[in-house]
Image (cartoon, rainbow, N blue to C red):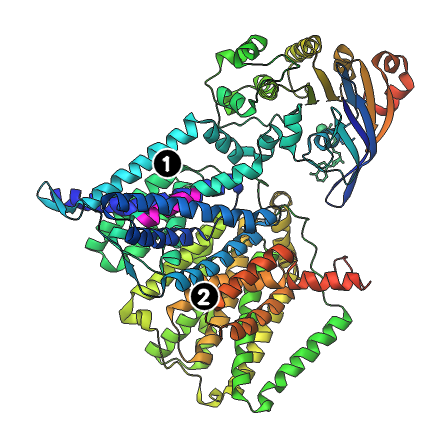
Amino acid sequence: MLEISNIHTFYGGAHILHGVSLRVEAGEVVSLLGRNGAGKTTTIKSAIGLVRPRDGRITFDGTETTSWASHRICHLGLGYVPEERRIFSDLTVMENLEVGRRPARDDIPAWTTDTLFELFPNLAERRYNLGGHLSGGEQQMLTIARTLMGNPKLILLDEPSEGIAPVIIEKMAEVIAEFKAAGLTVLLSEQNLHFAKLVSDKAYIIESGEMRYEGTIAELEANSEVREKYLAV
Amino acid sequence: MAFYFAQLLTGMANASALFLVASGLSIIFGVTRVVNFSHGSLYMLGAYIAYSSMTVLPGIIGFWASILVAGLAVGLIGMIIEVCVLKPIYKAPELFQLVATFGVILVIQDMALLIWGPEDLFGQRAPGFEGVVEIFGERVPSYDLVLIVLAVVVLIGLWYLFTKTRVGILVRAATQDREMVSALGVNQSVLFSGVFFLGAFLAGIGGAAQLPKGSANLLMDFGILAPIFVVVVTGGMGSIWGAFVAAMLISVLQVYGIRFLPNSTLVLMFIVMAVVLVIRPWGLFGKPEAAGDHGSQGPPPKPFRQLDPSGRIIVAVIIAALTLVPLSGVNFLSVLFADIIIFCLFAASLHYILGVGGLVSFGHAAFYGGGAYVAALFVQYAGTPMELALMLAPLGAGFAALIIGWFCVRLTGVYFAMLTLACAQVLWSIVFQWDEVTGGDDGMLSIWPSAWASEPGVYYYLVLVLGVGGVLVLRAMAHTPFGYALRGTRDSALRTEAIGMNVKLIQWMAFVFAGAMAGLAGGLFVFAKGSVFPTEMEIATSFDALIMVFLGGVQSLTGPIAGASVFTLLQDWLSRFEYWRLLLGLLIIFIAILLPGGLAGAVDQVKALLGRAPKDEAAP
Ligand SMILES: Nc1ncnc2c1ncn2[C@@H]1O[C@H](COP(=O)(O)OP(=O)(O)OP(=O)(O)O)[C@@H](O)[C@H]1O
Ligand SMILES: [Mg+2]
């Protein structure tokens, strides 16, 4: 469903991604693992068009999107949940959701504020609070809910477990399992192998802007050499 | 009591147009991060278009429809400006956008002159609201009440738009994080154009609505620029409520001010702003700028290069050639080149604060004109000889920069630019309003050099020595430890702070130094011309200096010199055409879009093409 082939991405003069490729099939949950600064965020931002690869190809759902503007990629059904959450702190929870709202699609179930509040009951209580007044965990839920309002077919989740309490991490894992059950496709970036293990089918490992490993989660678990080499313990 | 109430109403009526225009500016800035300097021009167009429309459309309906027509037409013009001028340069450093909108001011000025002619056009009175109403026994023009209602209606309308509609919510979200908004599926490009339409629409309505109280004229654009900046800075950038409250506060105080301190009206505005900013640096309803949110998004600035030996030889040759100018025996050439040298010094002093210090000052003419007036005042009232006056000019300008700088360096980015502009306007208004001392609009005449330097050729040598000397001092100061510290504050204020340097103090000192050097240029200018007028201090002069620096390229110490020389020659040549502003404006816009590195950058590009790429390594 999402295919990244051999992309080279730069920030100014700095060459960050050196020919990164990955594939996510419909219905899969795929983890992109790697240490700090490995290039996970850059890969995800390239996919959603926030940085433009100088070379290589990105196709989503059969359409080449390599040089598209972000909003057009979003319209095709790619949802982006940023690492830093990027909640609109001056807007209420309801208004934050409104920004993400897009028309329903035929092929997947449509999200509404009501169904999202069922999924994230904490947000329901705080619907008229400003985004800036939410706790870190609530902001993490809001940023996911906001993206779901666009009814994406594939969600890019950038380090969803970063900097939040263990209870909420469990909640995140449940939420991702629900997405999978609902037929959504997920690409998530992680440093935390334990979290990735809980939710994903496949894993890629990136290091210094190059893909170093590709395999199923079970294979990765069996391969302690790779784990020690590329992932923090 | 009744009298004060009537005055209050007058003040509120005056605030109406100010609020409309300022809120438009604020909305545009909030989303696009562009300070639209041509916003005053849109206001002016609103008045002109309403005038024309009223002469065509008859009667009551014609009058009110004309205001709407003016708003819509100006909204469209704003959108065209956004699409043609700004879209190509959103990614460029903010100075490009500011300079490009300045180009737009020039274009609109000449277009208005071309279409409507130079005379003031007096608008029709509002049908049904020609007279006065009695309120508590005081007579108040009934149209004043219409203006107050208009302001309140627009305020409520904007409140509704921004809180109750999807578009408004998107705009507010984009004000915070436009990249995220676009990743959520909103077409930024359309949003930006829409926001420009709205902002320009408000400016157009503002200009049209005040027509019955005044006229449509060619001075409206610069006239309203300083007041709207004061309003926006005082109220807080991006805040509609702030714009409303600040416009009311300032206009009402001004009405009372005219009563009690007739010659201080413009200064009063500044005092209000100063008090607010000392207490709340981000204005009444504003929020601190998110660090790194705007400013240059382009590649990081390259380190300045010290001249290599061949560069030194070129400089020596140029200076040697300059010493030959008076030998030509053509006085005109001595005068022209003296002008060029003076502007080089002026531009180089601005570059010190802008290029080396990274602070975009929009009021640098305050110190240039300030130095000129200090010299002229001493000559006129104390009989000071030229030699002493030329020393007092930089001292006086430096002193003004000391005071203005203290306020300004507390802010950064666009706030800094707006505040420097507003402060410069205050000095300008003092000079302009204080007839008895400065001669006001008529300027100060007969300020000639001492006898020994009275020949243009001899005075030229004085300019050459002091001007080139000043430029070399500015250059050298960029390579001193102070200069490195200043560049440190530009590239990373946090890091500079972390190694124990006082960022604000460094910036303040640089501001004073740059101001003093501009003052020296101003002093040289007075004796070259024998006179000085308030125009030396006005916004357009500050803009000239900015354009010189920009033309030359910000990232090079040679840039301002090249820019000033080219600009002066260009202006000298263009001013032979009737519509030279139009040509200059278009030229500026094209350069902003096509030559992102200025002339110096273009030279580097050519060199690179020729395979002689300049060394990027910094000298120590
Ligand atoms: N805006 C930027 N400009 C320049 N370099 C950047 C920028 N953003 C990231 N980098 C660099 O690109 C490299 C990859 O960064 P990226 O954010 O993709 O890593 P990551 O794998 O997401 O790391 P983390 O786990 O810390 O989020 C890093 O070396 C980083 O320093
Ligand atoms: Mg990351």
**x, y percentage for residue A131?**
51, 23
Q: Is residue B202 above or below residue B510?
A: above
Q: Is residue B21 visible?
A: no
**x, y percentage for residue B306?**
72, 64
Image mark 2: chain? B
The secondary structure that dominates the magenta segment is helix
Dot 2 falls on a residue whose secondary structure is: helix
Residue B397: numbered disc? 2
Q: Is residue A219 above or below residue A12?
A: above
To the question of a shared chain for discs 1 and 2, the answer is yes
Is label 1's Cβ within 8 Å of ligand 1? no
- In terms of depth relative to the viewer, which is nearer, A112 or B222? A112
Left or right: B250 with respect to A62? left
User: Is disc 2 surrounded by few (<14), some (14 to 19) or many (20+) residues within 10 Å?
Assistant: many
Q: Residue at x 73, y 73 (%)?
A: B312
Q: Residue at x 42, y 54 (%)?
A: B41
Q: Residue at x 38, y 45 (%)?
A: B71
Quadrant for ligand 2?
Answer: top right
- Classify residue B351 by image quadrant: bottom right
Image mark 1: chain? B
**x, y percentage for residue A102?**
57, 22
Amino acid carrying mark 1 in the image: Trp
Location of mark 1 (residue): B241
Which quadrant is home to the N terminus of chain B?
top left
Which stretch is magenta?
B199-208
Residue A29: numbered disc? none
User: Is disc 1 surrounded by few (<14), some (14 to 19) or many (20+) residues within 10 Å?
Assistant: some
Q: Tell whether label 2 touches label 1 (CB within 8 Å).
A: no
